[in-house]
């Protein structure tokens, strides 16, 4: 694979989307982060173990904006709304949201914060630096680039009645059922707000300039 491979929108579409992004309120010179935290409304699977709570990301969002960045919350209108914050655009719930602008915003972001969802693969196609949070699968959630960072959800074994170490979890792949890509023996607990903030701070400390 060519590590320098990168998709790019045609120039005429870039111009159209640049105007739309300005109307969102995103300054032309701003550096910004796209964040997508999977919820179950779009796929109507609210109990899916891949879902996470955007509220646990608020402190990380505030940290990014305190460092001068903007945050674009990606997703769809079924998602819970973000509280109003400076330099934050809740694009998932914005009336101007459209598929082409989705692509443009991801293409232009400095890096992408995501969870186990399809949108993270769009960021990968644009070769975006990635902070992967609340990951639930080591089969297809692993970082793709040296600058990427990943933190997994906590996994508890019901049969053992305790949390598994990462090694124990990796070594128990025989329990995975292909219908769900998980195990009925596992219970997942989301990353805490502090864990996500710590990962965000670490990621920003070596963010490519």
Image (spheres, grey):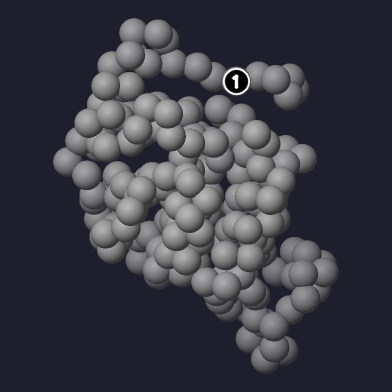
Question: In the rendered view, would you say 108 is above or below 45?
Answer: above
Query: Between residues 119 and 180, which one lies in front from this camera angle?
Result: 119
Quarter of the image that includes the N terminus: top right
- Residue 137 appears in view: no
Residue 48: x and y, percent?
44, 65
**Quarter-wise, where is residue 162 in the image?**
bottom right
Query: Between residues 28 and 56, which one lies in front from this camera angle?
Result: 28
Residue 38: x and y, percent?
43, 56
**Quarter-wise, where is residue 52 in the image?**
bottom left
Quarter of the image that includes the C terminus: top right
Q: Is 144 displayed left or right of 114 in the figure?
A: right
**The residue tagged with tag 1: helix, strand or loop?**
loop
- Residue 21 appears in view: yes
Q: Is 172 displayed left or right of 31 in the figure?
A: right
Q: Crowdedness of circle 1 by 10 Å Cα count: few (<14), some, many (20+)?
A: few
Residue 83: x and y, percent?
28, 63
Residue drawn where x is 38% and y is 45% of the image: 72
Residue 86: x and y, percent?
33, 53
Q: How many circles with numbers are drawn on the protein?
A: 1
Residue wearing tag 1: 6
Question: In the rendered view, would you say 95 is above or below 166?
Answer: above
Residue drawn where x is 48% and y is 55% of the image: 66
């Amino acid at each position: 694979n060519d590590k320098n491979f990168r998709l790019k929108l045609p120039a005429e579409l870039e111009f159209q989307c640049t105007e739309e992004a300005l109307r969102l309120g995103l300054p032309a010179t701003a550096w910004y982060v796209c964040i997508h935290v999977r919820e179950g409304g779009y796929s109507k699977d609210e109990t899916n173990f891949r879902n996470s709570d955007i509220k646990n990301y608020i402190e990380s969002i505030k940290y990014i904006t305190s460092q001068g960045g903007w945050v674009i919350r990606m997703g769809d209108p079924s998602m819970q709304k973000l509280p109003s914050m400076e330099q934050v655009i809740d694009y998932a719930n914005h009336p101007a949201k459209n598929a082409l602008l989705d692509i443009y915003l991801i293409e232009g972001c400095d890096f992408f914060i995501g969870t186990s969802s399809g949108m993270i693969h769009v960021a990968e196609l644009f070769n975006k630096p990635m902070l992967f949070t609340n990951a639930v699968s080591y089969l297809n959630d692993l970082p793709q680039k040296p600058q990427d960072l990943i933190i997994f959800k906590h996994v508890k074994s019901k049969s053992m009645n305790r949390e598994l170490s990462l090694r124990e979890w990796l070594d128990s792949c025989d329990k995975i059922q292909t219908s769900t890509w998980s195990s009925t023996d596992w219970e997942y607990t989301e990353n805490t707000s502090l864990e996500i903030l710590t990962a965000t701070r670490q990621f920003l400390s070596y963010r490519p300039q």
